[in-house]
Every structure is written in structure tokens, then in C-alpha cells.
Amino acid sequence: MENITLLIGIVIVTALVFDFTNGFHDTANAMATTISTGALKPKTAVAMSAVLNLVGAFLSVEVAKTISGGIIDESAGIRPEVIFAGLVGAIVWNLLTWLAGLPSSSSHALFGGLIGATVASVGFDAVNADKVVMKVLIPAVAAPIVAGIAAWAATRLTFRLAKGRDEADTAKGYRAGQIASAALVSLAHGTNDAQKTMGVITLALVTGGVVAPHSDPPLWVVVSAGLAIALGTYLGGWRIIQTLGKGLADIKPAQGFAAQTGAATVILASSHIGFALSTTQVCSGSIMGSGLGRKGGVVRWSTAGRMVAAWGLTLPAAGLVAAGAALLADQGDWGIAAVAVLGLGVSGAIWAASRRKPVTHDNVNDLNTPQGLPEEPVGVVTAALQAVAPPPAAPSAPVTTAAAPAAPAAATTG
Amino acid sequence: MHIDWAALGQVFGVSLVVTVGLVGVFTLGILGTSRKPATTTSAPADTAGTTALARTGAYACFALCAAAVGYGIYLIVA
């Protein structure tokens, strides 16, 4: 640990920032419908998700090994600069999709970034094309379909069984069940996604010669990755929560339960069988499926279309940004400094743009859709919450976390 | 290019069966514990003793779901 160079330090910090945006981005997966159906108050929901993400990060190091040794050929001369450029690409794309309120896969952004940076810096040979297809493309198509059909069928069944029952009577049970499913999704997310960051940091340490190839991530890596993802989750990407919880479909408690259970099942089944599906796509698919499963249920296809377009763009867009960053970073120390400064500038600009129409935990359930959704009773609770504790400027943290460590870094390397 | 269709099919099958099964069982549990409307025909048993039976059945359903959640946690940890 003593011989970590400045560059590797920058990579580690950037990886943690990515981890933060990952948690931030993916809170919606577990908690969007939980919040929109009123199963949990917004703040409670993100707090629970954050804790479970943190716990999940400590549960296993299985994924971390496969990410650092999978898609990219580490032996082909991947240097820390390349990883840094890849992370910058992934972060920028994550922030952009967050600004647009679109749930896109953070893992795909990470893969795209790493692939783009590797191609720009080393060449196509260093990327395992087979692995890209198997781990990114096929799952991206399969996940929403599998989850959507499962959630659709489950929604149909539960509405048929509960026919004739007063919704007020059953809603409580559904909400309780939904909390359990959402907890599983959060836990699974922590084990999967925090480990991607651990994998990246370990990869950086391996390329820098600090740890031996194919070794487990050191404990401090596990701890910091877990904390970063939990913090991001807690601050909550409210824009994406709003889209998934309210924008995509009108979700009643029964549907929320069916969608969340379907998502949890698909995520666990896929990772257990060894065909990992992206959490984001699974959750979006299951929400759409349950939206269609209710008689008279609507899915807002324009929102769904934008979301699918964002999925398609994630890999190439993050890859392009990362490729540009890699070319710049290859120019030497000033190039790396320029990438850091540009990355911070873009992040700051995105954050500034988001402040024009902030979405926070107290307006997350009010969405002015064409259908004119009825306001949830949650609004009252959150209004009270707001009176007690004024809402923090949630999205300001990623900028400050990024700014603090990278600014001195830029000064020293430049 | 090798695509593992078998694994994908397995994921699909398992997900569909487990999701529908769990949601179905949980719904039965909710039905057993929630208030019945006056003109019910959904419960197979009739008149006296129905509520006790329904309750027991409902708790069994919830227990099954809890077991499924436990298994889920086991899968995550293992």
C-alpha cells in the first residue's frame, strides 16, 4: 500500500466517485416503486437501501474477480491512465442520464468506458469481444423481456386472485411484501455493483504492480467501495426514482409488489445460474410488465422509448467519452490533469443544470404527467419531514467529493 | 460466438415460475388475513371455521414467502 503512486491514487478516487454515482443512479431500481406506492417514505427507503448496499458490499468478493479478469485483457498492457479514462467516461454518462432522469445501467457505462479507453489506448485486440456480447449485449436485451414477462404474469395472477377485494384492505399486505423484495434487490445490488468498483480498483492496483494479479481486493478497498455506494444510494437519484416510480407506469401496491418480486427473483436467479442480468434493465422491465398486467394499466411508451434509447447509447457513449479521455490522458501528466479538469467541469455543469428543476425527496412523487396523477398521501409526510429538516442539496455531494481530491491532484501533476 | 441459450432459458423459466408462484402464494396470504367482502365465493371452505382455517393457511403462505426471502439471502451470501 506504501508504493501507490499519485496516478493510482487518482484512479482509486475516480473509481470511488464512479461507485458513488452508481449508488446514486441505482437507488431507483430497488426503491422507485416502493416510494411511489407509499410502502416506505422516501427518506426511509433510501436509508434502508443504503444500509443494505453497504452490507451487500461485504458479503462476497466473487464478482470483483471476474470483472478485473474478464472483459478486458489485463495482460495486454492496460495502464492506470486507461482505467482512469474509462471511469471518467462512465461517470459523465451516468451523470448525463441522471440529469435526463433515465435509468441506464451503471455497469454498462463502466464496461463501455473501459472498452472505449482500452480501444483508444491499446487497440481492439485487448477487448474480449465474446465477453462483451455475453456480458453486456445479450443481457441488455434479455433482462427487460424476462423480467417484464414474469412481472406481467404475476400482476395478472395477483389481480385475478384478489378480485372483489377492497384495495384498501390488501394494499397494506402488498406494501409489506414489497419492502421485503426491495430489500433483496438492494442487497443484491450491493454485492454486485460495489464489487465492480472493487474490481476496478483491484485492476488498477494490479496494473500498477501494487498487488499480485488475480488477488482478492484488500479490505480497505472493500470498505471504501461499500461506503461510497451506500452514500450515493442514500443521497438518492431522485430524478430516476421519479421516472421509474411514476413516469413509466401507474403503479398500485399490488403491481409494485409483483414488479419488485419479479425483479428480485430475476436478479437472484440470473446471478445464481451464472447469466448475470443488469439490475437496471431488470427493474425497468418488471415495472413495465406490471404496468401492463393490470387491466386498464398504462405504460408511457414515450418514456419507455427514451429509456431504451439511453440503454442502447450507454455503451457507445461512455466508450466515446472514455476514448477521448484516454487519447488525452496518453499525452502525459498534463493530459491526465486536463481529463480530470474537464471531467470536473462537465460534472459541475450537469449538476448546475440539474438545479434548475431539482427533484428531491419531497417532490419525487409529484409528476406532472399528461395523465395527471393523483397526489400520494406521502406528500403530506414528506412536507412534514421537510419542515423538520430542510432538504439538503442532494446532488451537490458528487461534485464536492470529486473536486476535493482531484483538484490538488491536478495541481501537482499539471 | 458462443451464446449460452440454455442458461438464459433456465433464467427465464426459473424467474417466471418463482415470481408467479411467490406472488400467487403471497396474494393468497393477503386474502386469508384481509377482511372478506360480503358476497365472497373465493374461499373454497364455507361458513363456520373458515376464518380460522383461512388464517392458518394465510400464515403458512407468509411463512413460505419468508422462507423464499431467506433462500434469496442465502443465494446472495453464498
Image (tube, coloured by chain):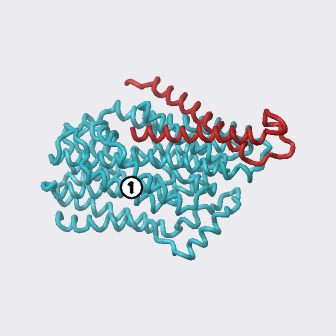
Which one is nearer the viewer's eye here, A147 or A231?
A231
Which one is nearer the viewer's eye here, B36 or A1?
B36
Residue drawn at 65 percent across, 37 percent down: B25
Side of B64 relative to B9 (left or right): right
- The residue indicated by pointer 1 is A229
Chain B is shown in which shade?
A: red
Side of B49 relative to A24 (left or right): right
Residue A29: percent from left, percent from top: 51, 49
Does residue A14 appear in this view?
Answer: yes
Which one is nearer the viewer's eye here, B52 or B25?
B52
Residue drawn at 63 percent across, 57 percent down: A38
Residue A138: percent from left, percent from top: 45, 33
Q: Amino acid at mark 1?
A: Ile
Write down which chain is painted cyan. A
Residue drawn at 87 percent across, 42 percent down: B39
In the picture as drawn, the residue positioned furthest to the left comes out as: A3
Residue drawn at 27 percent across, 52 percent down: A221
Q: Residues within 10 Å of mark 1 (few under 14, many from 20)?
A: many
Side of A383 relative to A312 (left or right): right
Which one is nearer the viewer's eye here, A295 or A42?
A42
Say which chain tag 1 marks. Answer: A
Q: Quadrant of the C terminus of chain A?
A: bottom left
Q: Quadrant of the N terminus of chain A?
A: bottom left
Residue A272: percent from left, percent from top: 43, 33
Residue A407: percent from left, percent from top: 25, 67
Q: Secondary structure at mark 1?
A: helix
Residue A26, above or below A402: above
